[in-house]
Amino acid sequence: MGSSSEHHSHAHGEHEHHASDVGYATPQAAIEQAARETIGYVSALYVGTDLDARDMLTVVDLDPDSETYCEIIDRIEMPVQGDELHHFGWNACSSSCHVEGAQRRYLVVPGNRSSRIHIVDTDDRENPELVKVIEPEEVFEHDLSAPHTVHCIPDEKIMISMLGNADGDLPGGFLLLDSDFEVEGRWDTPGDIEMNYDFWYQPRRNVMVSSEWAAPATYQPGFDLEDVEAGKYGQKLHFWNWEDRTVEQTIDLGEEGMVPLEVRFLHSPDSDHAYVGAALSSNMFHLYKEDGEWQASKVIDVEPREHEDWDMPVPGLITDVVISMDDQYLFFSNWLHGEVRMYDISDRTNPRLVDTVSVGGLFSDRQEVNGRTINAGPQMLQLSLDGERLYFTTSLYSTWDNQFFPAEGEEGSVMLKVDVDPRKGTMRLDEDFLVDFGELPDGPARAHEIRWPEGDCTSDIWM
């Protein structure tokens, strides 16, 4: 079950895999010790297009000294059509530094529509291979479906947020895999929560926060404003006792916190500060603990904008959030507006906007990069460990793409890069960097999640 075609041999010698390579002792060590990313793993989807093709995991060359820089140098086709590969993650990260022989080696790549979970071995970084598939029936046995966020948790186990029950309705929950990628069972008790989406745990604070999207039956066909009015989209955050696996507190964010998606704790393992972006309300909330209770305070408000083709003001639609490894900067994407924002969060309660990059989307003046039309807004983000390069792709979810940016399904996505100066707090679009997912052999594909072999700013957690 190896990867298909396109094997290249320009080995990056300094990135050879070592058995002890699971992560870094501290976030600061990640900044100082990590080599520059030279490989990116990016999901590429054909769901929702007219093409008779299967979703893929691609290998993108990010080494500026390489002859194949900005090219897709390998790709792994999934065995079955229709997965909607979404977010994926590592089998082990810095939370397993204490486990002897642990390796950050396998990518856990779920299909959100199919509930199929793929295990990809990246021991040969440029030519990874699919080594195992967990079939949907094994997932449905635990009355779960629609896998979303993958986090490596301590002791080499893997936890996946599941957005629905076996029928694609509510409630969702959490699935556990063991270190051999066998389904161990549920992490939670069925019915603890109704809606689910993203999660982040902070072991030293004995807390996990989970957010809400909607039931798969609601969001998978596409976005309908009537579903929002009917209360079918989430607006709550759940604060769990990490050791006891129980919900200790739930905060309803109300109308200003509609559809809270990505949750990010600061990287410092001692921190009890986190941020969550409410997509539909386009607000950013700061989460913190005060007198033993968790609080959620709105700290950023993205104003909706008037558009001639819309009969309502267009929300920014905050779809992804990333925090720099040194906990100084927060970046997020406004997918509909076509914008990436950078905030200084050294004052946790008062984020300060320091720069924006505008490209694609419904409002940007820059709808072209390197001669290529950018047919959607910045969406999935990934930041280099040193905080100096921010990469992004443009696909959100196939049915939503088709509604808001239909050209993307016909022309495919792009991956772009912004150069960040953390000392000055500035961003600049790299006009020479463009990975075109419209030029794949099977036809144009949508690009989504991005991961680095050495770990990244959205997967590493410290014990």
Image (spheres, rainbow, N blue to C red):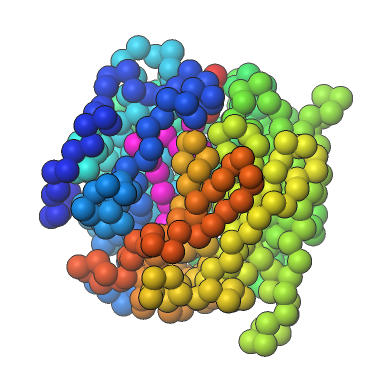
Residue under the image location 54 percent in, 68 percent down = 359
Residue 451 located within the stretch drawn in magenta: yes
Residue under the image location 35 percent in, 52 percent down = 42
Q: Is residue 159 in view from this perspective?
A: no
Q: Does 345 sit above or below residue 81?
A: above
Q: Quadrant of the N terminus?
A: top left
In the image, taking residue 381 as reference, residue 82 lies left or right, namely left
Residue under the image location 77 percent in, 37 percent down = 347
Considering every residue shown, the one lying at the far bottom of the view is: 308
Count of numbered labels shown in the rendering: 0
Considering every residue shown, the one lying at the far right of the view is: 291
**Percent from the top left, x then y, of residue 46?**
32, 66
Q: Nearer the viewer, residue 293 or 388?
A: 388
Q: Quadrant of residue 72?
A: bottom left
Q: Nearer the viewer, residue 399 or 309?
A: 309
Q: Is residue 254 in view from this perspective?
A: yes
